[in-house]
Structure formats: C-alpha cells, structure tokens
C-alpha cells in the first residue's frame, strides 16, 4: 500500500511541477496577468480527470497541461485560451456539461470548450459523411472564435508528440489526418514552426526508415554545412555592423519532410538537394516607419557582396501572404558555387512567421483582438461555402482544402485594384470571385489585353478583364476549369438547380408520352427505356429528356411493343428449364469470409497476396514499400503505398478502415515496377542497361521505352521484381554505368 501512496504522491508532485512551469511561462508573456482563473481551471480539470491514465501510463491531466503550455509558449495566446486548453477534454470525458463550465468560468471560455468538444474525436467520425459534418462544425466554430482552432492544433501537436504509445493502425490514421488537414491549417494560420513539426512527426510514423535515413545523412553533413554557413555569413556580418543595425543571423536547415517531398517530386537523391541550408537575417528596425526600408537596405548591401539570382527575389514585405507572413527572400551565389537563400525579416515579422496571427496580439496596444483583414476574408470564403448545401462530404473537404492551403498570386482588375487569388486560379475563378452573376454569364477574358479562354491559368501580376454575355449559361465542363472553392461551390449549386428543373420537365414529358401510348408507367418499363438510351438510372433519364438530349419517339414505341413477345420467350425458357444458370449461381455462393482484426498488424504473406488482397493500381506497391491496408465496402483489402495520394485521402476520410500491414514474403511472387533512367547517349548504352538488368540480376524486363534528343537520352523500363531490395540493387548497378546521370523508381 505504501508503494501505491508513494506513487500517488510522486504523480501529484509531477502534476504540480508541470502546472508551475505553465504559470511561469504565462507570467513571462506580455498578457494581462490573470493567474486566479488559470489556477481555478487547473484545479477543476485536475479534479475532473482524477485517477484517469493515458495510454502511456501517465496521469491524464498531463495532456491538458501540455496543450496549455503549447498554447501559451508556441502560439502565444492569453489566459482565456490557457483555461480553455486546460478544460478542453472535461466535457467530453467526464460528466460535466458546457453549462457547468459557463457557470464557473463564464460564457467565453465555455464557448471555446464547446467548440473543442464538437470537433474532438478526430475531425472525423466513422463515416465519411459524418466527417464532413464535423469539419463544417469545426469551421463554423472557428468563424466564431479563431482560438478554437488554435487550441485544436495545439492538442493535435501534443498527440503527435506522444503518438508512440498508440496502436499502429491508429498511428496511420492520426498521422494521415495530420498531414491532410492540420499541417496545412497551421500553415494557413501562419504557424510555420508548428506546421513543420506536424509534418515531420507524421512522416516519422509513416516512413520510419526513410526518416531515419535522411536524419543520418543530415547529421553526417552537419559539419560541412556549419563551415559553409560561417564562411558565407562572415562578410555579411561585417556589412551589417557597418550599417549599425542590431541583428542576429540564423542557419535554417530544411525539414526532413520537405527534403523527402522534394526527393519524391523532383526524382533526385538526397545528395542532389542543394537548398538544404538557408540563412535568416533577423534585425531590429531603427524605428517602425523605417522597417520596410531597412529590409531593402540590407538586401542592397548584401547583394554587393554576393551576386543575387535575377529571378528569385520574393518580396512579401510589400505584399504580405494571406496568412500575414512578411519577409524578403533573395537567393545569392556563395563562394562555393552554390545558391543560398537569404530571408530578411524584422523581429516583428519573425514573430508573425513563427506564431502566426497570434503574434499580432503582441504588437497591438492593450492586447486587442485578432488581426482583421486577411483572416476575415478567409473566414468569409468558408462561410460562403458552408451556406451552400453540400451533397457530398468528401467533395466538401476537398473544396475547403483547395482554398485553404493554396499559395497566393496577385491579380489586378482593369481599374488597377489588387486581388489575391489562390495559385493555379483560372480566369473563371476570377470571374466568380468578383460576383456570382459575372461568373455565371462569363464567356471569356482578356488577360493583359489579350483574349484568353475561361480555362486560362492566371499568373501573378496579370491584369484581368472578364467578358460576359446575357445569353451565357453555366456549363458542366466549368467544374473542371474552376480551381477555387468558391467558384466550384457556386457552379455546382447552379448546375444542381438546373438539373432539378430539367428533371421535372423530363418527368412531365415522359408521363405525357405514356398517356399518348396508353402505357402504364411501371418501374420495369422505365428501366427498359433507360437501358435503350444507356442511362444509369431513372433520374439521369429524366434530366436527358428535360434538356432535350433524348427525344422520345418511334424507337421507344417499338421497344415497348416488343415487350409482350419477349415475356412469352421468358416464360418458355423458364418452363423448359435452363439449369445451367442455376448451377452457376450456386457455384458463385461466397465462401465464408475470414474476420480481420483491424487492431492487429496484418501479415502480407505470398498466399494471401495471391488470393485475398488487391494491389492498388494507383501506386503499384511491392514488398518492402511502406504500405497500409484499406478495407473497402465489400470487405476486400486493398494495399496502398503510405505516401500514395489516394491513401492520404482514405486515411483522413475512412480512418477506421485502415489496417496496419507488414510484408512477410519469401521472393516467390513477382511485382511490376517502373524505373526512369536519364543520361548522355553513347553507342552501346542500351546494351549495357539490358546486360545489367537481365544478366547480372536475372530480372525480367517487360517493356523498354527509350528516347534520345540532342545527345540526352531518357527512358522507362518496366520490370518484374520480388521486393524493394531488388529495385535498390538495380538502381545502384545502373548508376555505375558511365554516362547515366539519374536512375529513380517512378509510379508509372
């Protein structure tokens, strides 16, 4: 019993210490000091969660304290948010209600806790449609109070930091969801530091080996990078000292996730990523008015030392990003012959970059409310999307995602007004961003005074004039042209409305046709006509009649006249028996399906791969790849690579159907892979390639495509291999051939 008591006392001390640290952190901030209410919230939460443990074995209250610490230190919020973070699981996990919270802590804290309770359970429930509803809730609560989402991101960050104690299938679900929603959300709110950590942690759980490999390579090249950094910054320091500025220069190393991402998209090995190092100059301006000028002064003075890249000056000082980010990015040629990016920001800009909107409070007199402007615009867009009833949940997620996470371009109206649009926006998106009426009657556009179609992609700095016509109607192919959430939602709503009208007209015309022909409108007859016109269902058939794609006529009459004779035939075959059919039916009776336990890791053995599981066509996984299983509606298990875009969607939409898997194969089965080769052409190169693959490694080549252009050759080889090790061996051996410059595995 003593040991139990000791354990309890030790736990209480640990909790007390953690809370003390939180208070000290809070006292160090510039917020109004409201210790009483924070202590009250802690005592209340501590009491409510008493005796409950987390999966890791520590007392549950440690989680709310950790979230409150992140909210205080890393996002920079004040007492209201700290209290809400301490209380965020009370309503969900205990018998207390939101009303209780309101009575004790007031309406504001209760409202935020209520918002957090609504979107708990991951954003997603068990079904995808429930998930979208929850996402709507999330965004609606957000538009009431941005702090809800900031605390939610802090909660997710702590969950990710302690993900190791979770079951593997849960790990993939949470990591996938984090990459799909939370990291981009943190980025959009300007929480750059948190976004990077969320991405890295997700990547660590999804691809542990690749993570480790890149980490080791980063550590191995650290000394070299330090040397380059010191040599590169020495003359810059001299120059800045001369200018009499207060400054600090930091080295920023590319995150493991973004290195891997670049390796994937550019098909290059780690050794060929040259922008691992960036340099950050953070200065204190002489006074706030001079802040912008100081940025450009620093740029001018350092470009005298090193040659700047002519096309890579990014000025977010004069035009901040939508998430408030401001900085001047320049790329300079170092003495070692490599381009190095330099980011120039003031201390204020740096705070905004690291802490996002929350940092604005620091710079407002009296700690005012959130930054208006861009955030408000963003929330307005989301409200507009929410106002339109969305039929499909996943579409809704994608729609939001499109808008939420895109980078921006700047476009001018004919009168010279500046509009911010997401990257990849088309002329059609721009038309809908001005007004729904302009969008729906738009026939084309003039970009920089040249006529362009609606699908034309806009570039930053374009001047756009929209041309409209009263007779123009929204076309179904517009859904493909539009990329912004607003335009897509509007087009879909207009098309749905039109479709309903056509459907009604079609129904009326069909009923008239039946009346004339004196035919009873039975389901079987309508089905027959649908088949005749290749229509999927009755609704489509009605729409096609309504919009005059189908005109009911003689063919339909003949089809219905034949009906009697065909019935007689049916009767004949039935009475004289066609036993074959029945037998087939019997044979097709499904065998008893084995039950799959989603909580356990599924072993992918060779027998199972041949009989039970399906390899996804989208990403062609092979033994040794990081994979996961997805159980579809028919209980079939489909194996996807973890980084496959389809899998990303499944993880965040159908998290409960994800199964953790691992390979257990013994090189009997062969799998198809694609390898991309590029190099300098010379005589006998093809022969060398085939020699390496077929002779040395005795691998079957299925297909070989090679093209040469001006002495550069590139090609794709399709091979049958056993596992990832085979692929690595082939790629390494091919790289040894003189004149071959890059060999990578590609999706297809």
Image (cartoon, rainbow, N blue to C red):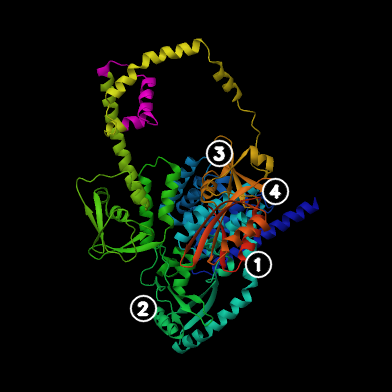
SS class of the residue under badge 2? helix
Image side of residue 151 versus residue 494, left or right: right
193 above or below 338? above
Q: Residue at x 53, y 15 (%)?
A: 578
Q: How crowded is the residue under tag 2: few (<14 C-alpha within 10 Å), some, or many (20+)?
A: few
56 above or below 713? above
- Direction bottom: furthest residue: 242
Q: Earlier in the sequence, mark 1 or mark 2?
A: 1
Residue that mark 4 sits on? 667
Image side of residue 84 versus residue 613, left or right: left
Q: Residue at x 43, y 76 (%)?
A: 309
Q: What x and y, as percent, mark residue 234?
A: 53, 85
Could you tell me if the residues under marks 2 and 4 are in contact, i.e. CB atoms within 8 Å?
no
Give residue 632's mark: 3
Extent of the magenta region: 515-543
Q: Earlier in the sequence, mark 2 or mark 4?
A: 2
Magenta segment: does it hold 541?
Answer: yes
Q: Earlier in the sequence, mark 1 or mark 4?
A: 1
How far apart, in angstroms, are the residues tagged by discs 2 and 3? Answer: 60 Å
Q: Nearer the viewer, residue 13 or 169?
A: 169
Q: How crowded is the residue under tag 1: few (<14 C-alpha within 10 Å), some, or many (20+)?
A: few
Magenta segment: does it hold 536?
Answer: yes
Q: How crowded is the residue under tag 3: few (<14 C-alpha within 10 Å), some, or many (20+)?
A: few
Could you tell me if the residues under marks 1 and 2 are in contact, i.e. CB atoms within 8 Å?
no
How far apart, in angstroms, are the residues tagged by discs 1 and 4? Answer: 29 Å
Residue that mark 1 sits on? 216
Residue that mark 2 sits on? 289
Q: What x and y, as percent, mark residue 250?
A: 53, 76
SS class of the residue under badge 4? loop
How far apart, in angstroms, are the residues tagged by discs 1 and 2? Answer: 45 Å
SS class of the residue under badge 1? helix
């Amino acid at each position: 019993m003593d040991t139990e008591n000791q354990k309890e006392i030790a736990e209480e001390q640990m909790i007390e210490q953690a809370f003390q640290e939180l208070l000290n952190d809070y006292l160090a901030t510039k917020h109004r000091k409201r210790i009483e209410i924070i202590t009250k919230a802690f005592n209340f939460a501590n009491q409510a969660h008493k005796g409950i443990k987390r999966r890791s074995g520590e007392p549950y209250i440690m989680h709310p304290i950790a979230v409150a610490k992140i909210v205080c230190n890393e996002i920079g919020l004040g007492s209201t948010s700290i209290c809400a973070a301490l209380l965020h699981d009370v309503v969900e996990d205990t018998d207390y209600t939101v009303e209780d919270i309101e009575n004790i802590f007031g309406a504001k804290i209760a409202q935020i806790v209520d918002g957090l309770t609504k979107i708990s359970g991951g954003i997603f429930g068990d079904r995808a449609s429930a998930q979208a509803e929850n996402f709507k809730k999330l965004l609606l609560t957000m538009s009431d109070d941005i702090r809800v989402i900031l605390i939610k991101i802090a909660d997710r960050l702590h969950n990710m930091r302690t993900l190791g104690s979770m079951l593997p299938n849960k790990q993939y679900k949470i990591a996938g969801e984090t990459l799909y929603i939370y990291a981009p959300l943190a980025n959009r709110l300007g929480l750059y530091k948190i976004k990077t950590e969320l991405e890295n942690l997700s990547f660590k759980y999804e691809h542990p080996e690749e993570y480790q490999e890149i980490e080791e390579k980063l550590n191995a090249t650290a000394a070299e990078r330090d040397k380059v950094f010191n040599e590169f910054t020495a003359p810059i320091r001299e120059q800045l000292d001369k200018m009499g500025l207060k400054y600090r220069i930091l080295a920023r190393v590319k995150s493991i996730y973004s290195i891997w991402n670049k390796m994937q998209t550019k098909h290059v090995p780690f050794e060929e990523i040259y922008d691992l190092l960036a340099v950050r100059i953070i200065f204190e301006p002489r006074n706030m008015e001079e802040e912008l000028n100081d940025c450009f002064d620093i740029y001018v003075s350092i470009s005298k030392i090193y040659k700047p890249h002519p096309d890579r000056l990014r000025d977010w000082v004069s035009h901040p990003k939508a998430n408030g980010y401001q900085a001047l990015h320049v790329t300079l040629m170092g003495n070692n012959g490599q381009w190095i990016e330099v980011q120039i920001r003031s201390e204020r800009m740096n705070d905004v970059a690291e802490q996002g909107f929350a940092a604005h409070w620091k710079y407002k007199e009296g700690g005012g409310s959130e930054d208006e402007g861009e955030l408000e615009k963003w929330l307005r867009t989301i409200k507009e999307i929410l106002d339109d009833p969305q039929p499909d949940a996943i579409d809704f997620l994608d729609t939001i995602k499109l808008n939420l996470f895109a980078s921006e371009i700047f476009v001018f109206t004919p009168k010279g007004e500046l509009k911010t649009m997401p990257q990849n926006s088309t002329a059609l998106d721009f038309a809908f961003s001005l007004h729904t009426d302009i969008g729906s009657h738009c026939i084309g556009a003039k970009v920089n005074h040249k006529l362009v179609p609606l699908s034309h992609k806009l570039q930053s700095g374009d001047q756009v004039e929209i041309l409209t016509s009263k007779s123009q109607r929204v076309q179904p192919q517009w859904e493909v042209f539009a990329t912004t959430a607003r335009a897509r939602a509007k087009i879909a709503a207009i098309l749905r409305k039109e479709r309903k009208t056509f459907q009604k007209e079609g129904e009326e015309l069909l009923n008239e046709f039946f009346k004339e022909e004196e035919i009873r409108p039975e389901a079987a007859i309508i089905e027959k006509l649908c088949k005749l016109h290749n229509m999927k269902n009755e609704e489509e058939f009605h729409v096609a009649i309504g919009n005059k794609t189908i005109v009911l006529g003689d063919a339909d009459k003949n089809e219905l006249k034949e009906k009697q004779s065909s019935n007689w035939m049916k009767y004949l075959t039935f009475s004289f028996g066609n036993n074959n059919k029945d037998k087939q039916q019997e044979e097709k009776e499904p065998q008893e399906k084995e039950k799959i336990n989603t909580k356990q890791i599924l072993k992918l053995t060779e027998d199972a791969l041949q009989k039970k599981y399906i390899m996804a066509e989208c990403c062609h996984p092979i033994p040794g790849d990081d994979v996961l299983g997805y159980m579809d509606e028919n209980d079939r298990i489909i194996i996807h690579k973890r980084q496959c875009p389809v899998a990303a969607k499944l993880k965040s939409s159908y998290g409960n159907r994800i199964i953790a898997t691992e390979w257990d194969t013994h090189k009997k089965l062969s799998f198809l892979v694609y390898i991309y080769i590029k190099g300098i052409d010379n005589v006998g190169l093809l022969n060398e390639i085939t020699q390496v693959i077929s002779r040395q490694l005795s691998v079957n080549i299925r297909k070989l495509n090679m093209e040469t252009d001006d002495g550069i050759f590139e090609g794709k080889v399709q091979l049958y291999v056993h596992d990832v090790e085979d692929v690595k061996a082939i790629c390494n051996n091919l790289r040894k051939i003189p004149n071959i410059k890059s060999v990578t595995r590609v999706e297809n």
